[in-house]
Image (cartoon, helix red, strand yellow):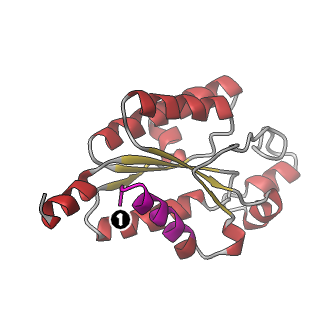
């Protein structure tokens, strides 16, 4: 293979990068930063934003454990399909339950599709201060129940491919650490 062919192979190799963590942990911000960097290098990258998925693909689902599982499986299906076809699918989704995330990983493994699980491990105290969508304030005021990490469970990944503590670094540094992992795995 020539250097150009090797470079082209890296650019067209798809992968799913699943960023899991609490609401306002920084998942989506990191995903968009990473997507910009990957696109600048010639990769095809898509961000499967959990809020957009809920609006379009998972409209009608609630936040019960069963509905959350269904939502995660739908997103995992789309991510694997994109990744299998040469796209870096960046998935910033809470995905609070380990068994749901494990099922997504298994689907990728069965299809031979690269999958990386990134735990954006921002503490709930930091997330509640960031409160990007006002969810923590609504929960504190009694206007919202079932908030992941507060009054609904979040099962932290036991063995993520990477753990990011976003409160200790910039968005650019967080995205760079994910990019470095992709490079180590021959995916960037």
Q: Residue at x 32, y 48 (%)?
A: 14
Number of marks in picture: 1
Q: Residue at x 53, y 46 (%)?
A: 50
Q: Farthest residue to the right: give it.
A: 141
In the image, is residue 45 above or below residue 83?
Answer: below
Q: Is residue 104 magenta?
A: no
In the image, is residue 150 above or below residue 77?
Answer: below
In the image, is residue 126 above or below residue 94?
Answer: below
Give the side of residue 175 with respect to residue 100, left or right: left
Q: Residue at x 40, y 62 (%)?
A: 183
- Label 1 CA crowd tier, 10 Å (few <14, some 14–19, many 20+): some
Name the main secondary structure of what is drawn in magenta: helix
For the record, the magenta segment spans 174-188
Q: Which image quarter holds the C terminus?
A: bottom left
Instruction: Tell which of 2 and 162 is nearer to you.
Output: 2
Q: Farthest residue to the front: give it.
A: 1
Instruction: Tell which of 184 and 171 is nearer to you.
Output: 184
Q: Residue at x 70, y 57 (%)?
A: 121
Give the side of residue 55 with respect to residue 67, left or right: left
Regarding residue 58, the answer to whether it shows in the image is no
Q: Is residue 175 magenta?
A: yes
In the image, is residue 157 above or below residue 136?
Answer: above
Query: Where is residue 167 drawn, in percent x and y?
Result: 71, 70
Q: Which image quarter holds the N terminus?
A: bottom left
- Find disc 1 in the rendering and name its residue: 38
Query: Where is residue 22 drawn, in percent x and y?
Result: 70, 51
Q: Farthest residue to the top: give it.
A: 66
Query: Where is residue 130 drawn, in percent x and y?
Result: 72, 66
Query: Where is residue 134 drawn, in percent x and y?
Result: 72, 58
Mark 1 lies on a secondary structure that is: helix
């Amino acid at each position: 293979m020539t250097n150009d062919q090797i470079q082209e192979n890296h650019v067209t190799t798809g992968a799913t990068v699943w960023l899991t963590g609490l609401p306002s942990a920084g998942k989506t911000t990191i995903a968009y930063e990473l997507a910009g960097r990957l696109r600048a290098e010639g990769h095809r990258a898509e961000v499967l934003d959990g809020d957009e998925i809920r609006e379009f693909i998972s409209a009608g689902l609630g936040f019960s454990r069963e509905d959350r599982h269904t939502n995660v499986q739908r997103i995992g299906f789309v991510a694997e399909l994109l990744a299998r076809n040469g796209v870096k699918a960046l998935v910033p989704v809470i995905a609070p339950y380990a068994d749901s995330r494990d099922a997504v990983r298994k689907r990728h493994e069965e299809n031979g599709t690269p999958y990386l699980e990134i735990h954006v491990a921002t503490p709930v105290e930091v997330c509640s201060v960031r409160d990007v969508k006002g969810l923590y304030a609504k929960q504190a005021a009694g206007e919202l129940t079932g908030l992941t990490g507060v009054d609904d469970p979040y099962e932290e990944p036991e063995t993520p491919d990477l753990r990011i503590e976003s409160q200790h670094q910039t968005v650019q540094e967080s995205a760079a650490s994910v990019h470095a992992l992709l490079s180590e795995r021959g995916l960037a």
